[in-house]
Amino acid sequence: MTQLDTNAALADLAVALPADALITDLDALESDRTGGHGAPLAMVRPTSEAHVAAALRWATRYRVPVVTIGNGSRLSGDVVTTGALIVSMTSMATIVIDHRNQIVVAQAGAPSVIVTDAVKEIGGFLPLSTSDAATIGGDVALDELGTSAAVVEMRVVLADGTALRVAGPLLADGKVSLGALFAGAAGLLGVITEITLFPYVAPECAVHATFTDAIAAADACVELAAARTGGAITLTRSPGGGSTVVLACDSAKDAPFVADVYRALGATSVTTDDEVDATLPSGTTLPFAISVPLTRFGEWFAGVAAVEREQGVAIAVVAQPEDERLRPVVVHDRDDDPAIDAAYAALATLLDLAQALELEVSGEIRAPRTARTWLAARLGDCVAETDQRMKLALDPLGLLNPGLVY
């Protein structure tokens, strides 16, 4: 569009939104973290689903790409924002607690830490990010901690402005869940505006252990899984190799046994408390999980340590051993461009490691540019074509989060 056309188009958008919802001052946008590459056209801060729908209808009419953000805490940085309309969800942050039905309804921009407090108020537990910058919409859209398993339903706006209410994975009951398409798709298929959560029953306690290396921590996970202790296990490998294992015990009577297992396998410290927090380290992460059998955790962690040494980066790994999902995170300053480039190079090497070990990968639909070559070679053209068909069915003009698809 020419500058004249751009001004006319933005004036058209301004008519459909409240006066303070549209920002066109590029200097203001530059200071606002968008997490992508290139100067955006404008930013919308909607306060309702109707505003989101209006913005997307406008974007479709004028063929303007759309990038949806929360607080920019974990965007891969691979999104192309040049000439894009940024939709910032942070002004949609209402949370409603339904004590009678034991559910929490949250708009997508609600901070995850506040949603966590709401969940605790009804005696529940959810694996949400503990970062102050994270939002519930981001947690569900990326699904890095398996949050979507507790989603009853969600509201989504498609690229053409159509608003939907779809069942979440929790209500799928073996059937196809439309909500499961949007959870984990990183905003490629639609913009999540509201999430209804039915939290897990809160565990009675959590037993934490610290190990000097991740391989010993992995051995502890194998031992606990074999003992069939009730509760979810989370293993976090810290940069440099030290690790923590947390078992959220369904029953407090299991805590002494769990502590004994930790100590027998060389834990340097063991503590028990009433709080369970799922923490995702801050940095650049793969937008999908690597599936590693419990018995091969040690092999994977040895490879991660080698990448750290050879490339001079700091790599954390978050794992849910019960479903064998691991997520590597290269930890760095989010404002350090050279460090971000080094992070992508390291993640590409980790994908090569996964291929060498013949491991499976989930979440192909939102693969960043750095991983596409690897995925095409590993998964074949059929998977790429299937992903493209899914994307085109819901976003035929390819406007949503450009740069994250094949």
Image (cartoon, rainbow, N blue to C red):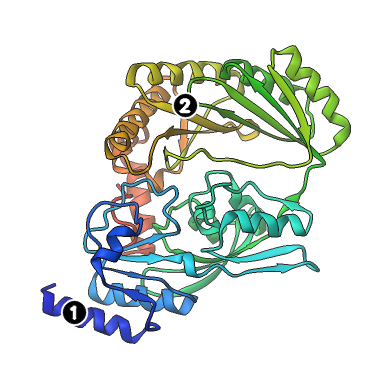
User: Would you name the residue on which mark 2 appears?
Assistant: 359
Identity, as a three-letter code, of the amino acid under mark 2: Leu
Do the residues bearing badges 2 and 1 touch, measured as CB atoms within 8 Å? no
The quadrant where residue 62 appears: bottom left
Mark 2 Cα shell of 10 Å, populated few (<14), some (14-19), many (≥20) = some
Task: Please state which of residues 223 and 207 is positioned toward the viewer in this rendering.
Answer: 207
* Element assignment for label 1: helix
| Vertical order, 7 against 387 (above or below) | below
Residue type at tag 1 = Asn
x, y (%) of residue 116? 66, 54
Residue 6 in percent (x, y) is at 17, 76
Q: Nearer the viewer, residue 224 or 89?
A: 89
Residue wearing tag 1: 7
Residue positioned 33% across, 47% down in the render? 77
How far across and down, in percent of the image, does residue 290 sit? 48, 32
Identify the mark nearer the N-term, 2 or 1.
Answer: 1
Q: Residue 386 location, x and y as percent?
A: 37, 49
Q: Is residue 172 visible?
A: no
**Residue 117 visible in the snapshot:** yes
**Residue at 25% in and 83% down:** 11
For residue 288, side relative to residue 369 (left or right): right
**How busy is the neighbourhood of tag 1: few (under 14 within 10 Å), some, or many (20 plus)?**
few
